[in-house]
């Protein structure tokens, strides 16, 4: 199984009239990653317990 996008793939898509959109990978700072992880943790808690965690952890 081939990995990646080849020139043959590009040629075939061009023949089919398919345009490929290259998406940039977003890079996040460690701070942004921690913030996102915190929100994901809150969402998991809410899914498991049916409510958001109490403020201040109590």
Image: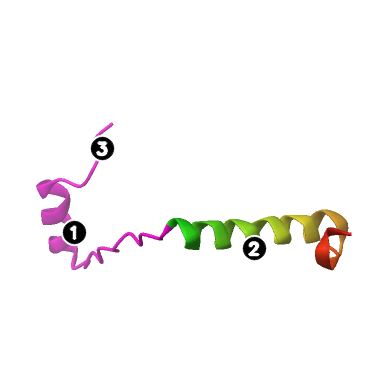
Coordinates of residue 56 in the picture (x, y in percent): 82, 64
Give the residue pinned by disc 1.
13
Tell me the mark number nearer the camera, choosing from 2 and 3: 2
Looking at the image, which is closer to me, 4 or 23? 23
Tell me the mark number nearer the camera, choosing from 1 and 2: 2
Tell which residue pokes out farthest to the right in this image: 58
> Is the residue under label 2 in contact with that under label 1 (CB below 8 Å)?
no
Quarter holding residue 3? top left
Q: Residues within 10 Å of mark 3 (few under 14, many from 20)?
A: few
Give the residue pinned by disc 3.
3
Query: Mostly what secondary structure, the magenta segment?
Result: loop
Q: Residues within 10 Å of mark 2 (few under 14, many from 20)?
A: few
Quarter holding residue 55? bottom right
Coordinates of residue 13 in the picture (x, y in percent): 18, 59
Q: Which residue is located at x 73 percent, y 55 percent?
A: 44
Q: Which residues are magenta?
A: 1-29
Cα distance in 3D space between marks 1 and 2: 39 Å
Quarter holding residue 4? top left
From the image, which quarter does the C terminus lie in? bottom right
Colour option used: rainbow
- Left or right of 21? Residue 52 is right
Looking at the image, which is closer to me, 30 or 15? 30
Give the residue pinned by disc 2.
39
From the image, which quarter does the N terminus lie in? top left
Coordinates of residue 27 in the picture (x, y in percent): 36, 59
Cα distance in 3D space between marks 2 and 3: 34 Å
- Left or right of 48? Residue 31 is left
């Amino acid at each position: 199984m081939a990995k990646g996008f080849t020139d043959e793939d590009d040629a075939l898509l061009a023949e089919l009239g398919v345009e490929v959109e290259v998406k940039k990978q977003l890079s996040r700072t460690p701070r942004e990653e921690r913030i996102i992880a915190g929100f994901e943790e809150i969402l998991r808690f809410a899914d498991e317990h049916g409510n958001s965690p109490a403020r201040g952890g109590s």
